[in-house]
Image: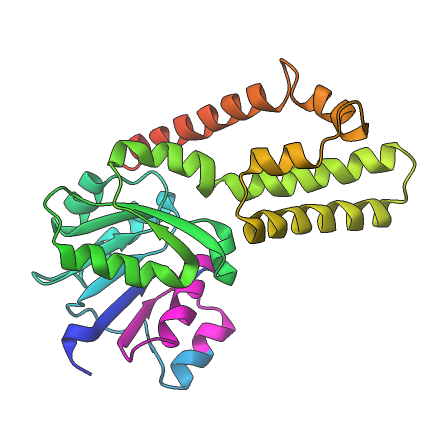
Amino acid sequence: MGKAASLTLVGAGRMGSALLHGWLKGPAREISVVEPSPRDEIRALADQGRIQLNPAPSESSIIVLAVKPQQFAAVSEQAKSFVGPGSVAISIMAGVRLAQLSRRLGTERVIRSMPNTPGAIGRGVTVFTAPEAAKPSDLAAARELLAPLGEVHGPVAEDMMSAVTALSGSGPAYIFLLAEMMAQAGVAQGLPEDLAMSLARRTVEGAAALMAESGDTPEALRKAVTSPGGTTQAALDILMDTGGMPALFKDALNAAANRDRQLSQEAD
């Protein structure tokens, strides 16, 4: 395998590992993983000769940064040692801007992306941004390498990335919270805790699957299950009230987007 196919992953946590397993199912590549505390599954891949674990630095065609944004400053020098004139760097770190990636890694060929945790099972959504002068081949590489996580959108303008982070990046936690709160409300109505949690989980899972399969908008699906004057309508009158979910989600996403902007400043 030549250097043209070389790929270096910096960080092999949950998202990094999901990408790695997806790449290993695809075209043959020379894959290196930089991870100071590798899990057993990563060590096993190295023992099998499928990846190189913590190799000596050398120029890699593509470097993917899959560490937490707070770790970027600490690992950027190590990552930079894999960057050469022909390298493109792809980040999945929240809040780290293109200009910051470019400055710390010493290359203009940078891609910034925001995946979400369902990517760990290939059911996520990732949005990416790139410099205006980005090569079409770099954009194509980003789409291909992020595809194992699920659906890929981009490139979008970088000023959209904080809103993307707030909506889809942090979004799975909102759904988990919804299931959690539904279960707690069921317990308050007298259901046993295990039954309430089972009902909440399956309802959220089933509703998401129905939305995926039907192709209808969430609004259309909501209206289809809401009979005028019925039980669902009584609940929605509360949830959609002035201080209910519409206002709460606007405030919540605003807070998340603002925090993403703060992370950008902290990365400096």
Q: Give the range drawn in magenta.
A: 14-43
Q: In which quarter of the image is residue 262?
A: top left
Residue 101 rendering spot, x and y as whole percentages: 21, 45
Q: Is residue 136 visible?
A: yes
Scheme of colours in the image: rainbow
Give left or right: position of 168 versus 182: left
Residue 228 rendering spot, x and y as whole percentages: 75, 24
Q: In which quarter of the image is residue 8?
A: bottom left
Residue 246 rendering spot, x and y as whole percentages: 57, 22
Residue 41 is inside the magenta segment: yes
| Nearer to the camera, 9 or 226 | 226
| Nearer to the camera, 115 or 30 | 115
Q: Can residue 263 be seen in this view?
A: no
Residue occupying the point 62% across, 50% down: 210
| Nearer to the camera, 92 or 22 | 22
Residue occupying the point 48% across, 61% down: 122
